[in-house]
Image (cartoon, rainbow, N blue to C red):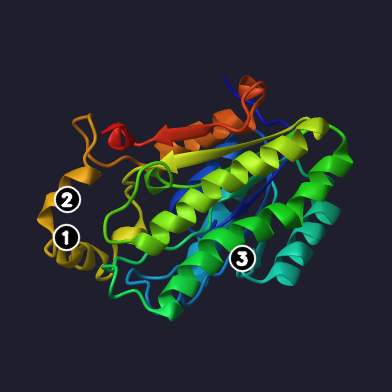
Amino acid sequence: MTGRLEGKVAFITGAARGQGRAHAIRMATEGADIIAVDIAGALPPSVKYDHASRADFDETVRLVEATGRRILASVVDTRDHPGLTQAVADGVAELGRLDVIVANAGIAAPQTWNEITPESWRDVMDVNVTGTWNTVMAGAQHVIDGGRGGSIILISSAAGLKMQPFMVHYTTSKHAVTGMARGFAAEFGKHSIRVNSVHPGPVLTDMGSGTMASEIGRTIETYPQLSSMLLGFLPMGICETSDIADAVLWLASDESKFVTAAAIPVDGGTTQY
């Protein structure tokens, strides 16, 4: 099946690489034009993996354009409400409409409970919660004004249904995103706008770069009993970004037209025990 988003426009955050890039390419392949944003630069000090670069973002643009669709890419921090609002307004002005919002940008920081500082708590909550709220607020009125309904997808985590050991701030933020999706779903329903959250388990992305793996290992060593909480049921313990993009595409398309306020796990069963 092709053309599932033909003629539509999708706004995607964190689009320079990883899941965000996968969403952009997948939706473009299905006929959507893309409004993309990414910080494409330094992340907060508590983040131990390598940050996305402008070159990464340029590669997303190239890959989307290779599908034959249009893309407007803006370097914006999702914590910047005015900047995000302007980026979306510019995109709608150029591309003509907005139908889909994918609030994908987020950060993670492995820290035991007593290593979390006020600064790292604030960083995680500001990016994952306030940045997600900013994303919806920047785009929702454009979707409403279109009068065609639409789909808003908030990328939470398996940690937003269960928990992620040694990441109290991350777990808290992703539970907040889960609730945010339900709250927006209730109020946007009268506009035929569906709002759902997606909950990935481990995904093969650049979040595993830098010293991220060793930091996760270090924190697990403080209480090894919790390490089994990351395991799923399927033989492959980690999925590809395309697996998450497939679920997001389904939620963006009319195939899920009666699905709203749902929390969709794509985690191999991680959240089930």
Name which quarter of the figure residue 86 lies in.
bottom right
Report how far apart the C-alphas of labels 3 and 2 lie in the structure. 32 Å
Q: Are marks 1 and 2 in contact (CB under 8 Å)?
A: yes
Expressed as whole percent of the image width and height from the top left, the position of residue 97 reads: 82, 44
Q: Residue 78 has which mark?
A: 3
> Is residue 151 visible from the viewing direction of this image?
no
- Please state if 254 lies on the left or on the right of 43 as rendered: right
Point out which mark residue 227 bears: 2
Disc 2 residue type?
Ser
Looking at the image, which residue is at 53% across and 58% down? 105
Marks 1/2: CA distance? 6 Å
**Relative to 61, residue 44 above or below:** below
In the drawing, does residue 8 fall left or right of residue 93? left
Which quadrant: the N terminus?
Answer: top right
Residue at 82%, 49% in the rendered image: 141
Give whichever of 91, 137 is nearer the camera.
137
Residue mark closest to the camera, 3 vs 1? 1
Foreground mark, 3 or 2, reads 2
The circle on residue 138 is none
Q: Is residue 180 visible?
A: yes
